[in-house]
């Protein structure tokens, strides 16, 4: 059975599928060097030279022969494209009808409040002058186009104003069979970290497991119990299948749901590193009704921490010879000589350490070293071109 992987970036899911000996072909935007080493890949950027257009992504994918379909970000916001692709092969994941419901924030937040769970207050009209608020698109991903709301400004169509909550940005991954769910990770999200060249509110990585300074194992068990109860109710009500993600704010020992990502999520490759399980295999089996006998609670307390960070370009750059990056543990690797524009991702960094702070420090150190190398390359290129340009 050949499975089509499709999304903005399919490298991590493709790597998992390849490791699990699945026959896959991928269609995404970036077409990274390390992905093309593993599986057949068609890239909007590399093979067609176009900007990201989800409609074009769907058109290219539709031309490929496949038996089953697995999607990642941001296809969950385009159920009509998933529906079109589903005419050619079985969906491994959530159906278009499930996507329409679970990505409807009004519907999801109403359900969660009715079940006694907490969500941030969300308004369609500008709020009064009290409190701190953010404005965000109704459908987005990775923190794109989220900013603080300035009192008095207009709220564009398809945007909402949401209560800003101080707390720890967090995520949970879970696997579901349409009725039941098993939580397989709790992570801290890295959001808007300048060390990785990104602006406020933008997602740039995770650290697994979630660890709260000054809190013991019992505290983490309480958080896990809250998460498990929430995803149990969501799964049963909406009929979620396969691997999914929950983004939430952890505040004063309580979780505030932000969104459900009803597909493979960026933090899941850390689960493979930490727990030695194959996420793509879990996803396929769950879609067939088989859940894993996995207990996250039994993994407490953690002896090792695993981190990933996406490094973004702070200015337009040209990378050098990147062929050795994969062996250094770098992922989402650009091709040698690629030109990367300011604000675009350069690559993904991975780290393992015995503590949360050490893990984050390793990621930051890798980012600083890579930026130093890239700056040196830009200087060398300028020095080479300067005499030519002066002729």
Image (cartoon, rainbow, N blue to C red):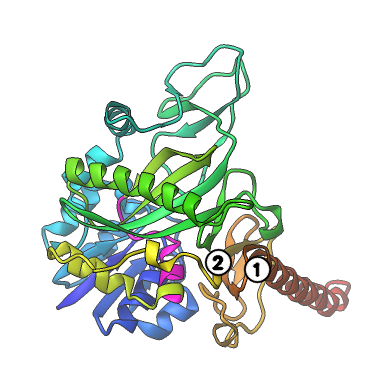
Q: Secondary structure at mark 1?
A: helix
Does the magenta segment cover residue 265?
yes
How far across and down, in percent of the image, does residue 86 sit? 15, 58
- 314 sits left or right of 297 in the view: right
Q: Are marks 2 and 1 in contact (CB under 8 Å)?
A: yes
Q: Quadrant of the C terminus?
A: bottom right
How far across and down, in percent of the image, does residue 358 sit? 68, 68
How far across and down, in percent of the image, does residue 3 sit? 21, 72
Does the magenta segment cover residue 232?
no
Which residue matches tag 2? 308
Q: Secondary structure at mark 2?
A: strand
Which residue matches tag 1? 363
Mark linked to residue 167: none
Kindly identify the residue that appears in the image at 46 percent across and 64 percent down: 300
Residue 137 visible in the shown view: yes
Kindly identify the residue that appears in the image at 26 percent across and 59 percent down: 59
**How crowded is the residue under tag 2: few (<14 C-alpha within 10 Å), some, or many (20+)?**
many
- 72 sits left or right of 30 in the view: left
Q: Quadrant of the N terminus?
A: bottom left
């Amino acid at each position: 059975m050949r499975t089509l992987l499709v999304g903005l970036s399919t490298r991590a899911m493709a790597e998992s599928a390849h490791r699990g000996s699945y026959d896959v072909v991928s269609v995404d935007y970036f077409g990274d060097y390390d992905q093309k080493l593993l599986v057949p890949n068609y890239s909007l950027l590399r093979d067609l030279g176009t900007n990201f257009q989800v409609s074009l992504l769907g058109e290219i994918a539709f031309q490929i022969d496949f038996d089953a379909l697995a999607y990642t970000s941001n296809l969950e916001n385009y159920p009509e494209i998933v529906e079109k692709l589903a005419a050619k092969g079985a969906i491994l994941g959530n159906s278009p009808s499930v996507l329409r419901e679970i990505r409807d924030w009004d519907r999801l937040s109403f359900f969660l409040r009715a079940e006694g769970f907490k969500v941030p207050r969300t308004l369609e009209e500008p709020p009064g002058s009290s409190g701190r608020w953010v404005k965000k698109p109704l459908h987005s991903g990775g923190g794109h186009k989220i900013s603080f709301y300035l009192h008095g400004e207009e709220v564009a169509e398809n945007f909402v104003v949401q209560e800003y909550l101080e707390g720890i940005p967090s995520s949970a991954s879970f696997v579901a069979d349409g009725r039941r769910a098993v939580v397989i990770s709790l992570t801290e999200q890295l959001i808007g970290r300048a060390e990785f060249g990104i602006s406020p509110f933008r997602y740039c990585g995770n650290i697994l497991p979630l660890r709260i300074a000054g809190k013991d194992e019992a505290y983490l068990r309480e958080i896990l119990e809250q998460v498990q109860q929430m995803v149990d109710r969501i799964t049963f009500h909406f009929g979620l299948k396969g691997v999914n993600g929950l983004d939430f704010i952890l505040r004063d020992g309580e979780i505030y749901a932000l969104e459900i990502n009803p597909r493979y999520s960026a933090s899941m490759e850390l689960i493979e590193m930490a727990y030695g399980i194959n996420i793509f295999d879990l996803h396929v089996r769950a879609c067939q009704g088989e859940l894993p006998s996995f207990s996250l609670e039994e993994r407490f307390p953690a002896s090792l921490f695993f981190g990933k960070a996406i490094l973004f370009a702070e200015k337009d750059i040209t990378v050098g010879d990147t062929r050795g990056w994969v062996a250094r543990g770098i992922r989402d690797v650009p091709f040698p000589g690629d030109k990367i524009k300011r604000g675009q991702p350069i690559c993904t960094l991975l780290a393992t350490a015995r503590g949360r702070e050490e893990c984050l420090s390793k990621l930051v150190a890798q980012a600083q070293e890579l930026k130093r190398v890239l700056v040196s390359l830009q200087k060398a290129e300028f020095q080479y071109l300067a005499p030519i340009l002066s002729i």
